[in-house]
Image (cartoon, rainbow, N blue to C red):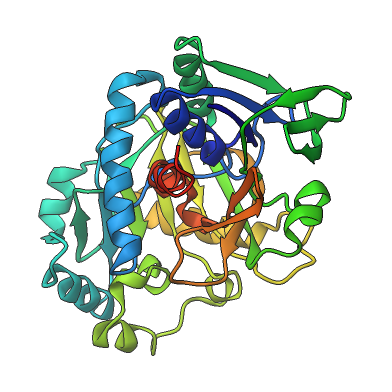
Amino acid sequence: MRILIVGGGVLGTMHAWQAVGRGHEVVQLEREPEARGASVRNFGLVWVGGRAPGVEYETALRARRLWEEIGTRVPGAGFRANGSLTVVRTEAEYAVAQEAANGDRGFKLLDADEVRALNPALRGDFLGALWCDKDAAVEPRVAQPALRAALESSGRYTWLPGREVRELTAGGVRDDQGQAHGADLVLFCTGAWLGGLVAELAGKPPVRRVRLQMAQTEPLPEKLTTTVADADSFRYYPAYRGPALDALNTHPQTEVAAANAMQLLMVQRLDGSLTIGDTHEYDEPFSFDVTESPYDHLAETASALLGRPLPRILRRWAGVYAQALDPSKIAHRERIADNAWLITGPGGRGMTCSPAIAEDTAEEAGL
């Protein structure tokens, strides 16, 4: 079968990976010279621990196993099973971590000395941390090119950037250069870009767009052995819901953190730099600029955990991702024509869950 994938981000690339792995010929089109959306504007987290019980958690676990297999085959993706520490600084935060550690996910509650033994770069003042050994990381800026290089070695994969698809036909698609591309099946993995042809074919899919702000620092001159989160992530991720979180929520976030729906996540890149974030903006039209107060908050929080000033920020950016409105769905997937599907809306789970989402599409579409 000849499969055509529209979209060069991680979701489209993982669909290409699945299709090539199942013996099909694949052509992947991307309207930009290189993927520039949420797939490269993220932490590179394979974030399992905070996922909602049930389908979301099981999907994240499956995706984590798939990522490890992919990382073994494609070292350039930068997969590493580094785990995560969610650091707690107050008794109310500690209570949430303790409640989570008493659950069935294999979390472990560490005291401050155990945290520093596991991650010596954390030298701030804190009570302890919740350790999750299931979390991992990849390199978001280079993972897609590395995966494509591996796909090209199969002899059954073609990458065509700088092509915007303008028409879906019974036999494939036609791009903005007037070129027809034949395919038995077309998979639209266009991320937060849901206008143009996607809107013509699918109308208004049941997803919303979410904007975030993030940054990258100069290299930290020592290894951050784990991903690091602050306890505001307890408020954001559904795994931690319970009486202890209810009690924590009676203690409000700082004004800046609350206004921007913030948490601190901090991941060290392979070059030693730190990716930090993030904010969440839900109401469109989104701002066109980035604001400084969230970065001040992130720097202050990260510095408190590191016990020294955060390295100088080199890059700041905003990104937008699409999130399915139905919280029970990992992504929105629908057949939009006899020969075409739309797959979008994984939300902040895109980098984590994309291998499993693509596997599910392959099964549902009969690849």
Q: Is residue 33 visible?
A: yes
Vertical relation: 16 (above or below) 137: above
Q: Nearer the viewer, residue 150 or 217?
A: 150
Q: Please state if 225 lies on the left or on the right of 255 as rendered.
A: left
Q: Nearer the viewer, residue 52 or 29?
A: 29
Vertical relation: 110 (above or below) 163: below
Q: Is residue 271 visible?
A: no
- How many badges with numbers are in the image? 0
Q: Please state if 8 lies on the left or on the right of 238 as rendered.
A: right
Q: Residue at x 28, y 69 (%)?
A: 53
Q: Please state if 231 lies on the left or on the right of 82 as rendered.
A: right
x, y percent for residue 284: 76, 68
Q: Residue at x 80, y 47 (%)?
A: 197
Q: Nearer the viewer, residue 367 or 291?
A: 367
x, y percent for residue 195: 79, 53
Instruction: Locate the C terminus by quadrant.
Output: top left
Q: Residue at x 50, y 36 (%)?
A: 15
Q: Quadrant of residue 239?
A: bottom left
Vertical relation: 177 (above or below) 45: above
Q: Nearer the viewer, residue 20 or 45?
A: 20
